[in-house]
Image (tube, rainbow, N blue to C red):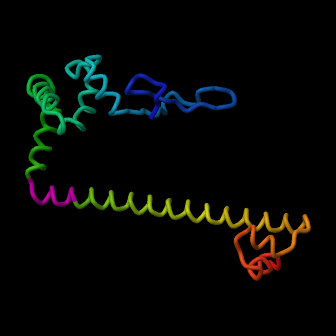
Amino acid sequence: MFPEEEDFHNVGVVMNKKSEHIISENMQLHFLEIPKVIREWQEDRMDPWDDILARWLLLFPAYEDEKLTTILEGIAMEKDPVLKKAIEDWERLSSDKDFLRLYEAREKAIKDRISEIETAEEKAAKKAEEETRIATKIEIIHNLIKMGLPIEQIAKAADLSVEEVNEILQK
């Protein structure tokens, strides 16, 4: 998200762009980058035993990493009762077939919607590209007419029939 920032947790404030005056100290935007917290943990630059925020963020990828899961369970048992409750609840919900079915259905619906949006964006991009190509061809035809080229040559150059060129010129 912010490649120029090294930290996984960055805080933005609301500021008047013109005067560079901070409008409110009470309104902040916290940006949490999970890939960076994972990297910091993997490179031993952060210890989830000491960093509460990092520990909670590491819960998201923990299901993919047995070592991380073991560490977080250890922290939960020895140091963080709230984390312990969250892990227990997640394990309980994960073993609940109805919950899993609902979770997977919701996840599928989200992925389907993302796919629909991407398909629509691709179609829109192709349509815009085609419209640009046609507009360019029309502009070239008009310019060639202004230069005095015969319609037959213009049709050949544009890979159109004489009738199609005449149709374009009449619009």
Verify whether residue 100 appears in magenta.
yes
Q: Name the residue rendered at 61%, 62% in the picture.
A: 128
Image quarter where the C terminus lies is bottom right
Q: Quadrant of residue 125?
A: bottom right
| 130 relative position to 10: left or right | right
Residue 161 place in picture, x, y as percent: 73, 79
Residue found at the very far bottom of the displayed protein: 163
Residue 59 place in picture, x, y as percent: 22, 35
The one nearer the camera, 2 or 77, is 2
Residue 48 place in picture, x, y as percent: 22, 23
Please, what is the dominant secondary structure of the magenta stretch?
A: helix
Q: Name the residue rendered at 72%, 65% in the picture.
A: 135
Residue 10's place in the image compared with 100, above or below, is above
Q: Name the residue rendered at 59%, 31% in the picture.
A: 15
The stretch in magenta equals: 96-104
Residue 107's place in the image compared with 82, above or below, is below
Image quarter where the N terminus lies is top left
Q: Quadrant of residue 87?
A: top left
Q: Give the number of marks.
A: 0
The one nearer the camera, 118 or 141, is 141
Residue 169's place in the image compared with 33, above or below, is below
| 148 relative position to 159: left or right | right
| 145 relative position to 1: left or right | right
Q: Name the residue rendered at 14%, 32% in the picture.
A: 69
Verify whether residue 57 appears in magenta.
no
